[in-house]
Image (cartoon, rainbow, N blue to C red):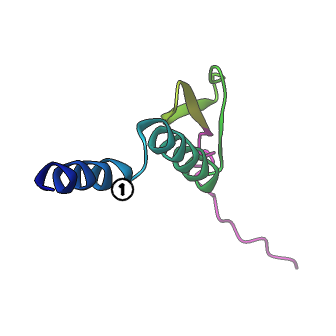
Amino acid sequence: MKMLCIFLTFVFIVSCGPSVPQKKTREVAERKRECQLVRGACKSECNTWEYVHYYCDVKPCCVVRDYQKPIINKITTKLYRK
């Protein structure tokens, strides 16, 4: 009877919780979702205008760099008409 209880306890503990492949699949899906939230894409490699945010499974999450307008000093002149 004691062996039966130990066996059932072991089976219960092992059966609870996800298996390792299911956990990995879930993590990969979460990373892909997070990549899409930052407007990125999981590609085999990033282009020069993109940066690697983090890795989705094996492929990098490529996010487009923010475009920064060049700073132009505006010359303010007033035109007068006569």
For badge 1, the amino acid type reads Cys
- Residue 42 location, quadrant: top right
How many other residues sit within 10 Å of disc 1, few (<14), some (14-19) or many (≥20)?
Answer: few
Magenta stretch bounds? 63-82
Q: Is residue 69 magenta?
A: yes
Q: Is residue 41 above or below residue 3?
A: above
Residue 55 relative to residue 61: left or right: left
Q: Is residue 32 above or below residue 77?
A: above
* Residue 38 screen position, x and y as percent: 58, 52
Q: Is residue 59 magenta?
A: no
Residue at image point 65% right, 20% down? 44
Q: In the displayed orientation, state which residue is furthest to the left.
A: 2
Q: Quadrant of the N terminus?
A: bottom left
Which residue occupies the foreground of this view, 29 or 61? 29
The secondary element bearing badge 1 is classed as loop
* Residue 19 screen position, x and y as percent: 43, 42
